[in-house]
Image (cartoon, coloured by chain):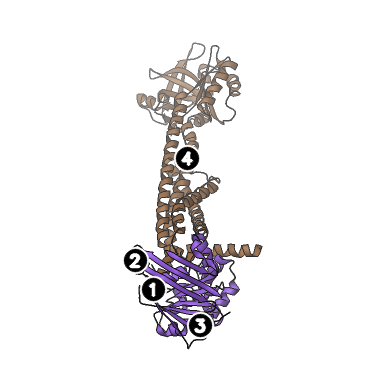
Amino acid sequence: MNVLELKNISKIYGSLKALSEIDLVVKKGEWLAIMGPSGSGKTTMMNIIGCLDKPSSGSVILDGKDIAKENAAGLTAIRRDKIGLIFQQFHLVNYLTALENVMVAQYYHSMPDEAEALQALEKVGLKDRAKHLPAQLSGGEQQRVCIARALINSPMLILADEPTGNLDEANEGIVMDLLQGLHDDGSTVIVVTHDPEVAEKAQRTVILEHGRIARIIENSSAEKADET
Amino acid sequence: MEGKKFKKYKMYLKMVTSSLLRRRSRMIVALLAIIIGATILSGMITVYYDIPRQMGSEMRSYGANLVLIPSGEGMTADDVNEAKKYFPTSGEVVGIAAYRYSTGKINEQPFMVAGTEFDAVKKVSPFWHVTGSYPSASGEILIGQDVAELLHVLTGDIVTLYGNAGDSSIYSADLRISGIVKTGGTEEGFIYMTLSDLEGLIGGTGKIDAAECSIVATASEIDTAAAEIAARVPAVSAYPVKKVTSSEQAVLSKLTSLVLLVTIVVLILTMICVSTTMMAVVAERRREIGLKKAIGASNRNIIVEFLGENIFLGGLGGAFGILFGFLFAQAVSMNVFSRGITFQPLLIPVTLAASVVITVAACLLPVRNAAEVDPAIVLRGE
Ligand SMILES: Nc1ncnc2c1ncn2[C@@H]1O[C@H](COP(=O)(O)OP(=O)(O)O)[C@@H](O)[C@H]1O
Ligand SMILES: [Mg+2]
């Protein structure tokens, strides 16, 4: 089953074509990496997949539904219900504790559940940091809170835009292991990365250049995508 | 289902209070603007309601607002009591001072001599400034400042007063000056003694030449009472003392409209100040708003959160405003009227409501803009 289908997607900013004629299909349970030089359109593509933005042309089918037809409120609802986002900068609400930051996602989605949120923090190894404010957490810890928040509503699709870009090697390892774990649990994960080592862990790597898909690498060393 | 609603509500409160408490320095700027506005608002309302009360008692101390004099035959104490029945029912009668007048001479100089009850005078004419004291025993007199200057006498001196007794013989009496009165008016040319002392000299007739009345009432109520008395009590003519009462009204209405004007200007300034602060706050929180929207917050979620914060801020600012406003009004009242004010309990809901409504109104536009923040800015890291 296809979680995501991009059909002939283009995104134009004024005279700049940030994405041109992208075609891509992502299967349920797949782990996909996106690589490419800076300015090649990776974030633009993630924004469109993540329903933060709409393509100038082409259609995005998410879980069988064309998002091009949705208005801003509709996109918000899709984002809330189907997508878990992890950003390059560790975006947390700075006046809420780690636990509350996870619960905010539950609050917008359905209802806050402290036990469940605490469980998610435990999963990323931060149960004892639950009551800390973001300013009291290290970069790696903040990013792990973001991961806990991204997975709390069991999204269909987890998107991470350079999640380890601002982390040291040790923390990068922890974060990648967590994403690996999510994938092992059956989540569909799309990660944008500069790091070939990170990309190697994915099943497929899409290489973007100048807004086009230059090539797609099937990674034989990684396990096969779940075909269900 | 109830549990679910409660959990959402609890989380909402948590978010709102955390935003205010943990971003304290930011919040304090907005709060300060609201407190200043609420303070001036509640202070002004207090002064606005208290001035008429203050002015009422100040102006009343300016003297009588109704004078009763005999028409024709002469007026007795009973006639005055009869007239009193037609006084405005709503107002308290502060005092009625009855006078009997005569003429007398001291050192060949003629003076007006008045007999009255000093306890009543103190109530009706509290503005009398007496050096020494009011007569407290028989044989004591109070003389006007002009009299004292003409005769070159001081408090404690003895003067000899003579004049026509009732039966056309001449009386002569040695009287001790217990005090000298200053009023800035015609009273300074008078010699005052108790009514019984005067009647002892010129003979009692039971008649009164004038009764000055001080009544807590409006000018029109006094007018009505005067007309009523003229119609119902034949022995008495009643004259409202128009000058004082109408000037009281004029000063009052000018003062209250000034206060109203200042209050409105302050409210507008407060709104501008609060909405400017809110705009700055919203601009500063664009990323946070974008983030919340990126993880699924609807525009309504964002608006409701900001409104919650502002209702909270407005309420808190209003509470401080009530306190400071009272102190402010108290200071004004002490300085201007030399007396305290009473706290109006109604001020609590009025100030709180005004403070919340103004704060919410001031932030509506910035918050609407806030809700329109594009969530895509978050991934871009702008
Ligand atoms: N909002 C925007 N307005 C104009 N140009 C944009 C905007 N967002 C991105 N771009 C341009 O689109 C191109 C692709 O950007 P981006 O997707 O952020 O690249 P990457 O994430 O691969 O570094 C860049 O040239 C960038 O300057
Ligand atoms: Mg990027």
Residue drawn at 46 percent across, 32 percent down: B59
Disc sitting over residue A16 in the figure: 2
Q: Quadrant of the N terminus of chain A?
A: bottom right
Question: Which amino acid does the dot numbered 2 rest on?
Answer: Leu
Q: Do the dots labelled 2 and 4 sit on one chain?
A: no
- Give the side of residue A14 with respect to residue A62, left or right: left
Closer to the chain start, of discs 1 and 3, is 3
Question: Which amino acid does the dot numbered 1 rest on?
Answer: Arg
Q: Secondary structure at mark 1?
A: strand
Q: Which residue is mark 1?
A: A212
Task: State which image quarter holds ligand 2.
Answer: bottom left
Residue B164 to residue A40: above or below:
above
User: Looking at mark 2, is its residue's CB closer than 8 Å to ligand 1?
Assistant: yes
User: Looking at mark 3, is its residue's CB closer than 8 Å to ligand 2?
Assistant: no
Q: Which residue is mark 4?
A: B48
Q: Chain of mark 4?
A: B
Q: CA distance from mark 3 to mark 4?
A: 71 Å
Q: Secondary structure at mark 4?
A: helix
Q: Are marks 3 and 4 in contact (CB under 8 Å)?
A: no
